[in-house]
Image: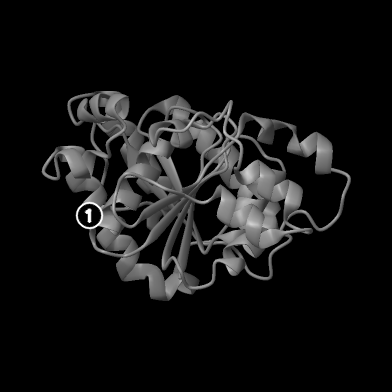
C-alpha cells in the first residue's frame, strides 16, 4: 500500500486537480484507489457529486466515532464514485471545527492512520487531499502518508507559499520517527511566459532533486472537466495536462520502493 498526501498552504496551485488526475489514472489501471478529502472546503468531495454542507457520513464522523465504533464510522463514510475502482472518504464543512473540539485532547494525530489500517489491504493506492492550514487535519494527513506531493504554481508568489509548506513539514517531522520524503510538482507552467520559466528555474536551482523533472502545463481543459465532475485523463487521455500526470504517476511508481533515498526536510 502506498499513501501519498498532496498539500500546499497556498490555494489555487492545482492541489485537488493533482489528486483527481493521479487517482483516476491509478483506478483506470484496475487498482482499487481511495481518495480522502481532508480539506473542509470540500472541493474534492464536490467534484465527485457530494455536498460537504449536507453530507451525513464523512471524515468528520470518523473523527467523532473512531474510538467507539470504528468500522461503522469508516464504512458508512466510504463512498464509491461513478468511476470503476475509485472510492472517496468525503469531507464535511464541519471538519473546520475539529481543532476547537479536539485540540486539547491527546492522541488525535493518528486517527487517519488508524482509519487506513482498518481498511487493511483493500486499497493499494491512497491519495489524501490536505487542508491548506496547519492543524489537526494536516497533522493527521502527514502522519499517515508515505510521501508528500507539493504542487507549486510556476509563479513568484507561489514560491513563497512553498517555503511555508516546507516549514510546516519541518515541524511535523519532529514528531515522526523519520523524515517524510517530498516531491515538488511544478504546475500551471506556461513556456511562453518569462515569469513561469524563471520560476521553474528557481525551483530547480533551490530544491534540486526535490523537484519533479516534468511540469504540468496550463491546460484549460482542467477547468472544463471540473465543471462536469470528470477527471481529465478520463475525458481526454491525450490532453497535455493528462499526459503530464501520466508521466508524473510513472515517476511516482518508479520511486515508490526507494522513498528513503528521496529528499527530506
> Residue 90's spot in the image, x, y percent?
52, 42
> Residue 66's spot in the image, x, y percent?
72, 56
> Residue 42's spot in the image, x, y percent?
52, 32
Residue that numbered label 1 is attached to = 247
Of the pair 133 and 19, the residue shown nearer to us: 19
Callout 1: few (<14), some (14-19), or many (20+) C-alpha neighbours within 10 Å? Answer: some
Q: Image quadrant of residue 18?
A: top left
Quadrant (top left, top right, bottom left, bottom right) of the C terminus: bottom right
Report helix, strand or loop for mark 1: helix
Question: Where 232 falls versus 22 (above or below)?
Answer: above
Q: In the picture provided, is 124 more to the left or to the right than 247?
A: right
Q: How many numbered dots are placed on residues in this image? A: 1
Q: In the picture provided, is 64 more to the left or to the right than 181?
A: right
Report the residue that reaches farthest toward the right.
Answer: 104
| Residue at (61% x, 67% y) in the render | 118
Of the pair 260 and 126, the residue shown nearer to us: 126
Question: Where 192 falls versus 250 (above or below)?
Answer: above
Q: In the picture provided, is 68 more to the left or to the right than 46?
A: right
Report the residue that reaches farthest toward the left.
Answer: 238
Q: In the picture provided, is 257 more to the left or to the right than 181?
A: left
| Residue at (32% x, 44% y) in the render | 82
Q: Image quadrant of residue 262?
A: bottom left
Coloration mode? one colour
Quadrant (top left, top right, bottom left, bottom right) of the N terminus: bottom left
Of the pair 189 and 198, the residue shown nearer to us: 189
> Residue 43's spot in the image, x, y percent?
47, 31
Amino acid at each position: 500500500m502506498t499513501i501519498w498526501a498532496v498539500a500546499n498552504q497556498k490555494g489555487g496551485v492545482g492541489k485537488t486537480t493533482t489528486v483527481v488526475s493521479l487517482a483516476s489514472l491509478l483506478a483506470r489501471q484496475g487498482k482499487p484507489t481511495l481518495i480522502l478529502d481532508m480539506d473542509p472546503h470540500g472541493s474534492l468531495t464536490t467534484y465527485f457529486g457530494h455536498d460537504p454542507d449536507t453530507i451525513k457520513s464523512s471524515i468528520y464522523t470518523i473523527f467523532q466515532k473512531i474510538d467507539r465504533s470504528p468500522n461503522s464510522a469508516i464504512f458508512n463514510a466510504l463512498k464509491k464514485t461513478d468511476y470503476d475502482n475509485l472510492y472517496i472518504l468525503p469531507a464535511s464543512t464541519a471538519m473546520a471545527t475539529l481543532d476547537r473540539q479536539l485540540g486539547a485532547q491527546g492522541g488525535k494525530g493518528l486517527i487517519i492512520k488508524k482509519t487506513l489500517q482498518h481498511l487493511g489491504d483493500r486499497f493499494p493506492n491512497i491519495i489524501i487531499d490536505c487542508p491548506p492550514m496547519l492543524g489537526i487535519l494536516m497533522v493527521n494527513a502527514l502522519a499517515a502518508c508515505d510521501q508528500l506531493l507539493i504542487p507549486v504554481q510556476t509563479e513568484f508568489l507561489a514560491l513563497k507559499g512553498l517555503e511555508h509548506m516546507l516549514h510546516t513539514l519541518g515541524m511535523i517531522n519532529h514528531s515522526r520517527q523519520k523524515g517524510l520524503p517530498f516531491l515538488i510538482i511544478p504546475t500551471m507552467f506556461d513556456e511562453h511566459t518569462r515569469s513561469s520559466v524563471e520560476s521553474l528555474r528557481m525551483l530547480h536551482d533551490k530544491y534540486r532533486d526535490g523537484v519533479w523533472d516534468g511540469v504540468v502545463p496550463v491546460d484549460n481543459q482542467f477547468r472544463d472537466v471540473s465543471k462536469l465532475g470528470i477527471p481529465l485523463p478520463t475525458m481526454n487521455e491525450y490532453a497535455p495536462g493528462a499526459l503530464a500526470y501520466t508521466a508524473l504517476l510513472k515517476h511516482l511508481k518508479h520511486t515508490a520502493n526507494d522513498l528513503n533515498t528521496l529528499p527530506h526536510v
